[in-house]
Amino acid sequence: MRVRETVIRPIGNSAGVTIPKETLEKYDLSPGDKIFLQETADGILVTPFDPLVQKAMAVYRKGARQYRNAMRELSKR
Protein backbone atom coordinates (compact mmCIF):
# COMPACT_ATOMS: atom_id res chain seq x y z
CA MET A 1 0.00 0.00 0.00
CA ARG A 2 1.35 3.38 -0.99
CA VAL A 3 1.08 6.26 1.48
CA ARG A 4 0.89 9.83 0.20
CA GLU A 5 0.97 13.05 2.15
CA THR A 6 -1.23 16.02 1.30
CA VAL A 7 -2.19 19.26 3.03
CA ILE A 8 -5.62 20.44 4.15
CA ARG A 9 -6.18 23.89 2.64
CA PRO A 10 -8.86 26.48 3.34
CA ILE A 11 -11.57 26.83 0.68
CA GLY A 12 -14.05 29.52 1.72
CA ASN A 13 -15.62 28.42 5.02
CA SER A 14 -14.58 24.80 4.37
CA ALA A 15 -11.33 22.97 3.71
CA GLY A 16 -10.08 20.66 0.99
CA VAL A 17 -7.23 18.36 0.09
CA THR A 18 -5.42 17.91 -3.19
CA ILE A 19 -5.13 14.44 -4.71
CA PRO A 20 -2.05 13.73 -6.82
CA LYS A 21 -2.64 13.37 -10.58
CA GLU A 22 -1.38 9.77 -10.74
CA THR A 23 -3.79 8.76 -7.95
CA LEU A 24 -6.68 10.42 -9.80
CA GLU A 25 -5.72 8.53 -12.96
CA LYS A 26 -5.26 5.21 -11.16
CA TYR A 27 -8.77 5.38 -9.70
CA ASP A 28 -10.35 7.07 -12.73
CA LEU A 29 -11.32 10.16 -10.74
CA SER A 30 -11.95 13.63 -12.16
CA PRO A 31 -12.75 17.04 -10.68
CA GLY A 32 -16.42 17.06 -9.69
CA ASP A 33 -16.58 13.33 -8.88
CA LYS A 34 -18.01 12.41 -5.49
CA ILE A 35 -15.82 10.75 -2.88
CA PHE A 36 -16.83 9.53 0.54
CA LEU A 37 -15.13 9.98 3.90
CA GLN A 38 -15.74 7.03 6.19
CA GLU A 39 -14.57 6.93 9.78
CA THR A 40 -12.86 3.66 10.65
CA ALA A 41 -11.07 2.32 13.71
CA ASP A 42 -7.80 3.25 11.99
CA GLY A 43 -8.78 6.78 10.96
CA ILE A 44 -10.50 8.25 7.90
CA LEU A 45 -10.99 6.24 4.72
CA VAL A 46 -11.35 8.33 1.54
CA THR A 47 -13.07 6.28 -1.14
CA PRO A 48 -14.97 6.77 -4.40
CA PHE A 49 -17.27 3.91 -3.39
CA ASP A 50 -20.51 4.73 -1.56
CA PRO A 51 -20.64 2.59 1.62
CA LEU A 52 -24.46 2.60 1.45
CA VAL A 53 -24.31 0.93 -1.96
CA GLN A 54 -22.01 -1.73 -0.53
CA LYS A 55 -24.48 -2.35 2.28
CA ALA A 56 -27.40 -2.55 -0.19
CA MET A 57 -25.48 -5.01 -2.36
CA ALA A 58 -24.83 -7.22 0.67
CA VAL A 59 -28.57 -7.28 1.41
CA TYR A 60 -29.28 -8.04 -2.26
CA ARG A 61 -26.79 -10.94 -2.34
CA LYS A 62 -28.32 -12.45 0.78
CA GLY A 63 -31.82 -12.22 -0.69
CA ALA A 64 -30.65 -13.51 -4.07
CA ARG A 65 -29.22 -16.63 -2.41
CA GLN A 66 -32.24 -17.12 -0.17
CA TYR A 67 -34.80 -16.75 -2.99
CA ARG A 68 -32.70 -18.13 -5.86
CA ASN A 69 -35.23 -20.80 -6.87
CA ALA A 70 -38.19 -18.42 -6.72
CA MET A 71 -36.34 -15.87 -8.88
CA ARG A 72 -35.44 -18.57 -11.41
CA GLU A 73 -39.11 -19.58 -11.69
CA LEU A 74 -40.26 -15.98 -12.04
CA SER A 75 -37.74 -15.35 -14.83
CA LYS A 76 -39.34 -18.16 -16.90
CA ARG A 77 -42.62 -16.25 -17.18
Image (spheres, helix red, strand yellow):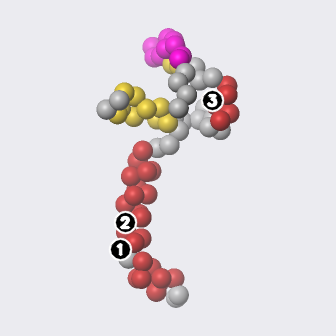
- Report helix, strand or loop for mark 2: helix
Magenta residue check for 11? yes
Is residue 9 or residue 65 the one in the foreground? 65
Residue drawn where x is 43% and y is 57% of the image: 57
Q: Position of residue 59 (x, y in %)?
A: 37, 60
The answer to whether one can see residue 6 in this image is: yes
- Compared to residue 73, the image places residue 40 above or below, namely above
- Report helix, strand or loop for mark 3: helix
Q: Residues within 10 Å of mark 1 (few under 14, many from 20)?
A: few
Q: Position of residue 58 (x, y in %)?
A: 39, 58
- Give the residue type that dot 1 points to: Gln
Q: Which residue is mark 3?
A: 23
- Give the residue type that dot 2 points to: Lys
Q: Which residue is mark 2?
A: 62
Magenta residue check for 26? no
Which range of residues does the magenta coloring cover? Answer: 5-15
Residue drawn where x is 45% and y is 14% of the image: 13
Distance of label 3 from label 1 (alpha carbons): 39 Å
Mark toward the start of the polypeptide (3 vs 1):
3
- Compared to residue 73, the image places residue 25 above or below, namely above
Distance of label 2 from label 1 (alpha carbons): 6 Å
Q: Give yes or no for contact between labels 2 and 1 (Cβ–Cβ under 8 Å).
A: yes
Q: Which residue is mark 1?
A: 66
